[in-house]
């Protein structure tokens, strides 16, 4: 069997940046007040009245070549199911090397545990047979897609096959598995 | 010009990446001092014939483990989850500078004591 | 993990992370973070609500929620909640209260209700209400006999739209709006900022329209999120929308782009309209709106090409310039020209599940007329009570017969809701009695004589929901967890007050569940099924004329009225007309104050919600980049705003230097600059637009308060703060 390759695709055309993904994630994953595993970015280019705007929901990119895993001295940061990037908080000493290494600012210290925390792609749901991540489930504009890239029939594969897409900071060489379609 | 707004406001990352604080700076300074001391005292040890120890020199080898202890203590303080520090020594990861550092420290520490 | 990496003594085992937030009980209900009433599933674990999800069976949420709905626990567990009944012990507004028992608080309220009725009659007591639980209070007031039952959601929000569409099609657009946006091939938004205004189904439908590659035309002085999704953004000069709408009509009529068959079959007054719009060419509109003629023509053609699946959206908060009914009429007429009412992709014909009312004795006829207008003949087409009018009628001397002596305020924070808050505070000072029923200690609670802490929507059952919608259905609100502290559900508060003022026959049910069971049973529905699933769907009905929905128009003529004889009979323009003199220019150095929403908040109701504030915690003053340059303002600089009448905001807010707004306007998200100190989280954050709205233009047709008619200038916060800190200054912030 081919190893699964979990990926996320955000449709920036329909995303309105409401932040439901953020609140949905925070309650699903009980993320501490003042911290967020996902966030909304609004980027505007141009001069009034000739403007273009890109709105998108961002989170850990679950990179194929993840610098956070590379620099982790204890093995806490590792590749998990579907080649997602996960943190085993029991192994984390909180040295913060991964926070400094992540080009996307996706990681933070969970103030209760003192261990690093970040988006898990909701693997606790996915591996439990629930097909959606919590951000995807809540999203009122249905702009978040999650699935398996190794399955060419999955929604994410089909979206990437048919729509113009990009990743954040491709020059960082991390090979993100979080895509944006426009 | 691009206007960028984000809803993220995670400590250490936002508004600018600021991961490590004074503890690490102090450790780096002390680490440098210790390295210097060890090089100097090593050179002294290697000289033939062994010159007479001045008081400063006899004190010096002891200074390195002492200062290193202080430095490592601060490094330990910097950890957000200090009771998991032992996890450094349940793994060696060649790709991780921090892993190298942890192991080198643990190797150097007894060496510095021996040197003394 | 070969090679040089190792992980001795273990410990390769990496367990899956499990946040453990799944509920041991999952209870369906519907939301109250705004007034859309989406179906939710509340997860309860060890007696605590851990998370709130959308109910996939619910035809409003379809299993998805907006940030507010997802953040309901931030309200439930808000540490600043009202916890016990309170009775005021110092001067009004002094915010000194004594915690009392429910019995003592209710007796105090009942005594005052009885006293006011005895001395002045029932009409001397007014109710302001917003939110679903307010139904119990409205019931109480109808039984009591007061005609003064007002909701700011009418004259301060959607009223003109309802009247404008009703005059044209014989029906309002209601809530949820009867827009069929998911099927539209062209969507035109006139100032409606969907995506920032997060009415869930509306935004879901808007996203579907985007996915369908519908043409989107956004008319807004601000580059809203919706405008960023649009094919055409028309940054119209504020106040000139009617000129644009008339020019569009001119093009459609002039070029013959309208739906001839529909217009001939269903409308009256086309010939009058044709003659009326003839002078309003795009060239005429250009200097007024600032929109190039070619752009006006092209967008008119785009709209016409998609007809009848063209939705010119009626908007929701439409009280802008005092000519709002006429603007809404213009929007309605454009829709009629394109044949979109009753057509797929335009407006569907709604239906609802008929639920018989609980068997009460009939309400007695209210004592007298509502006191909301200077003369009963004023604002003749306003068909609901005007909240600002009731407030005015409380101040002696404003009305010939000033009659109102007491208020009950349910879930509606009047100082930040009614324009010109100075007048509101003056009215409050004149009151003999003020009781507030609310969840949070908003400003109005601080001014009250008695404060009754209501349980949040997650802690109470409520009136059944059977809205007029595309899919008829019934929904139920259930007690997800028992009320915290000493809070009580609205039905209980209403009933206990009713009993105490001699109206027990209006509250014969034991609780709201028994109430719901009885009504459902009579209609032939199973209450247990409803409680288990949260919703029961009724049989679908035809939605469009082509599907068999009846093309019935409840107007005087029985047809769609392009020309309104009714408006003419009251001396108003029978067809929308552009009145040059109505549009005011900002004074030099001043900018028109516009306000709107952030997607994560329902005005001031949610700004103290710490969870929701994770995505938006303070409003910013949107200033065009060129204007900011002129003032030397940098992004993030703090300013106070001062309006044309010299009123300065109580607090400062950060400037957002942006290209996303016209240079002649500034923009604020409503709901900040809060003065209620007991809202400990949001107190003092940002700027309250409402305190700068000292002027408003009343819509002569129905009495709505046009509020986008104020102009503000900037004061550097550092200078104002230094002045305020000077020992001589004694301008203490008014308590709220």
Image: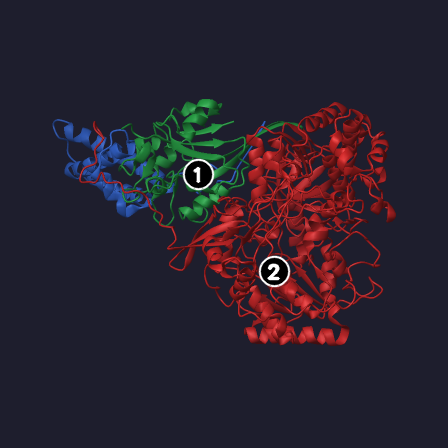
Chain colours: A green, B blue, C red
Q: Is residue A60 left or right of residue C312?
A: left
Q: Which residue is disc 2 drawn over?
A: C356
Q: Residues within 10 Å of mark 1 (few under 14, many from 20)?
A: some
Q: Quadrant of residue C508?
A: bottom right
**Badges 1 and 2, same chain:** no
Mark 1 belongs to which subunit?
B
- Mark 2: secondary structure: loop
Q: Is residue C386 left or right of residue A106?
A: right
Q: Is residue C237 left or right of residue A104?
A: right
Residue visible at 51% across and 68% down in the picture: C486
Residue A137 place in picture, x, y as percent: 45, 41
Can I make out residue A3 in this image? yes
**Mark 1 → mark 2, Cα distance in angstroms:** 58 Å
Q: Residues within 10 Å of mark 2 (few under 14, many from 20)?
A: few
Q: How many marks?
A: 2
Mark 2 belongs to which subunit?
C
Residue C482 place in picture, x, y as percent: 46, 63
Residue visible at 84% across and 37% down in the picture: C580
Residue at the far front: name it: C548
Q: Where is A3 relative to C538, above or below? A: above
Q: Where is B61 relative to C430, above or below? A: above
Q: Is residue C367 left or right of residue C485?
A: right
Q: Where is C658 relative to C732, above or below? A: above
- Mark 1: secondary structure: loop
Marker disc for residue B13: 1
Q: Nearer the viewer, residue B48 or C390?
A: C390
Q: Quadrant of residue C144?
A: bottom right
Q: Nearer the viewer, residue C633 or C194?
A: C194
Can I make out residue C571 in this image? no
């Amino acid at each position: 069997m081919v190893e699964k390759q979990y990926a996320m695709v955000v449709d920036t055309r329909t995303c309105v940046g409401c932040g439901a993904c953020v609140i949905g994630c925070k309650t699903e994953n009980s993320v501490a007040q003042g911290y967020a595993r996902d966030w909304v970015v609004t980027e505007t280019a141009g001069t009034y009245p000739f403007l273009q705007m890109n709105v998108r929901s961002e989170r850990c990119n679950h990179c194929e070549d993840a610098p956070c895993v590379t620099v982790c001295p204890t093995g806490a940061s590792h590749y998990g199911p579907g080649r997602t990037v996960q943190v085993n908080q029991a192994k984390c000493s909180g040295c913060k090397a991964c926070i400094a290494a992540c080009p996307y600012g996706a990681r933070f210290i969970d103030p209760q545990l003192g261990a690093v925390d970040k988006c898990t792609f909701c693997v606790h749901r996915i591996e439990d047979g629930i097909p959606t991540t919590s951000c995807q489930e809540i999203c009122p504009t249905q702009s978040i897609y999650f699935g398996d890239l190794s399955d060419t029939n999955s929604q994410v594969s089909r979206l990437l096959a048919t729509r113009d897409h990009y990743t954040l900071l491709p020059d960082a060489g991390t090979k993100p598995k979080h895509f944006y379609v426009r | 010009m691009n206007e960028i707004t984000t809803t993220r406001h995670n400590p250490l990352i936002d508004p600018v990446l600021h991961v490590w604080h004074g503890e690490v700076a102090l450790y780096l300074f002390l680490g440098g001092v210790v390295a210097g001391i060890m090089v100097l005292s090593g050179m002294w040890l290697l000289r033939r014939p062994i010159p007479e120890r001045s008081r400063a020199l006899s004190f010096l080898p002891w200074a390195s483990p002492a200062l290193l202890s202080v430095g490592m203590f601060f490094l330990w303080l910097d950890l957000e989850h200090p009771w998991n520090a032992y996890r450094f020594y349940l793994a060696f990861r060649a790709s991780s500078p921090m892993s190298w550092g942890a192991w080198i420290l643990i190797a150097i520490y007894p060496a510095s004591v021996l040197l003394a | 993990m070969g090679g040089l990496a190792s992980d001795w003594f273990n410990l390769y085992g990496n367990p899956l992370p499990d946040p453990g937030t799944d509920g041991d009980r999952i209870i369906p209900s519907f939301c109250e973070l705004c007034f859309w009433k989406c179906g939710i599933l509340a997860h309860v674990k060890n007696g605590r609500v851990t998370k709130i999800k959308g109910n996939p069976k619910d035809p409003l949420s379809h299993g998805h929620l907006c940030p507010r709905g997802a953040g309901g626990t931030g309200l439930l567990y808000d540490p600043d909640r009202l916890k016990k009944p309170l009775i005021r012990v110092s001067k009004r507004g002094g915010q000194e209260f004594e915690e009392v028992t429910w019995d003592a608080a209710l007796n105090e309220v009942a005594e005052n209700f009885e006293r006011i009725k005895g001395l002045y009659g029932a009409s001397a007591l007014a109710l302001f209400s917003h939110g679903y639980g307010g139904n119990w209070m409205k019931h109480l007031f109808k039984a009591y006999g007061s005609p003064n039952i007002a909701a700011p959601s009418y004259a301060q929000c959607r009223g003109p739209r309802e009247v404008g569409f009703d005059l044209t099609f014989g029906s309002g657009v209601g809530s949820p709006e009867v827009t069929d946006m998911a099927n539209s091939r062209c969507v035109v938004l006139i100032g409606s900022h969907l995506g920032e205004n997060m009415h869930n189904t509306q935004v879901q439908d808007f996203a579907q329209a985007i996915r369908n590659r519908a043409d989107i035309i956004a008319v807004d002085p601000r580059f809203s999120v919706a405008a960023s999704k649009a094919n055409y953004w028309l940054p119209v000069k504020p106040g000139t929308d009617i000129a644009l709408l008339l020019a569009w009509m001119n093009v459609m009529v002039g070029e013959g782009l309208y739906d001839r068959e529909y217009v001939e079959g269903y409308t009256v007054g086309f010939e009058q309209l044709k003659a009326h719009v003839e002078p309003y060419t795009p060239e005429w509109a250009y200097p007024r709106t600032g929109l190039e003629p070619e752009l006006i023509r092209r967008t008119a053609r785009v709209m016409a090409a998609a007809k009848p699946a063209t939705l010119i959206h009626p908007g929701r908060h439409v009280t802008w310039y005092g000519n709002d009914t006429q603007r809404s009429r213009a929007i309605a007429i454009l829709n009629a020209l394109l044949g979109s009412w009753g057509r797929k992709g335009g407006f569907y014909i709604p239906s609802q599940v008929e639920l018989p009312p609980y068997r009460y004795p009939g309400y007695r006829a209210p004592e007298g007329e509502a006191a909301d207008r200077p003369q009963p003949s004023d604002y003749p087409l306003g068909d609901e009570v005007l909240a600002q009018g009731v407030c005015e009628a409380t101040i002696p001397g404003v009305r010939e017969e000033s009659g109102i002596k007491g208020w009950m305020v349910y879930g509606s924070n009047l100082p930040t809701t009614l324009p010109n808050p100075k007048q509101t505070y003056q009215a409050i000072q004149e009151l003999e009695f003020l009781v507030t029923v609310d969840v949070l200690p908003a400003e109005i609670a601080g001014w009250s004589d008695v404060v009754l802490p209501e349980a949040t929507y997650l802690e109470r059952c409520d009136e059944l929901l059977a809205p007029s919608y595309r899919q008829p259905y019934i929904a139920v609100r259930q007690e997800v967890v028992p009320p915290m502290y000493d809070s009580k559900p609205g039905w209980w508060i209403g009933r206990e007050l009713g009993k105490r003022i001699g109206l027990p026959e209006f509250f014969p049910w034991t609780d709201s569940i028994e109430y719901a069971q009885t009504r459902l049973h009579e209609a032939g529905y199973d209450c247990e099924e409803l409680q288990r699933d949260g919703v029961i769907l009724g049989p679908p009905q035809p939605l469009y004329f082509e599907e068999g929905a009846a093309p019935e128009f409840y107007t005087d003529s029985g047809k769609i009225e392009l020309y309104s004889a009714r408006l003419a009979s009251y001396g108003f323009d029978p067809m929308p007309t552009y009145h040059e003199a109505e549009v005011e220019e900002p004074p030099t150095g001043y900018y028109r104050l516009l306000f709107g929403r952030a997607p994560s908040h329902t005005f001031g109701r949610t700004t103290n919600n710490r969870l929701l504030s994770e995505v938006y915690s303070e409003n910013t003053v949107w200033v065009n980049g060129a204007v900011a340059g002129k003032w030397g303002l940098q992004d993030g600089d703090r300013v106070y705003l001062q309006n044309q009448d010299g009123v300065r905001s109580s607090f400062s807010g950060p400037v957002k230097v942006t290209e996303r707004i016209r240079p002649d306007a500034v923009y604020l998200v409503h709901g900040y600059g809060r003065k209620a100190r007991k809202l400990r989280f949001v107190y003092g954050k940002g700027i309250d637009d409402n305190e700068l709205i000292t002027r408003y233009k009343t819509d002569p047709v129905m009495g709505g308060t046009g509020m986008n008619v104020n102009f503000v200038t900037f004061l550097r916060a550092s200078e104002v703060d230094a002045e305020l800190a000077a020992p001589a200054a004694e301008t203490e912030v008014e308590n709220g």
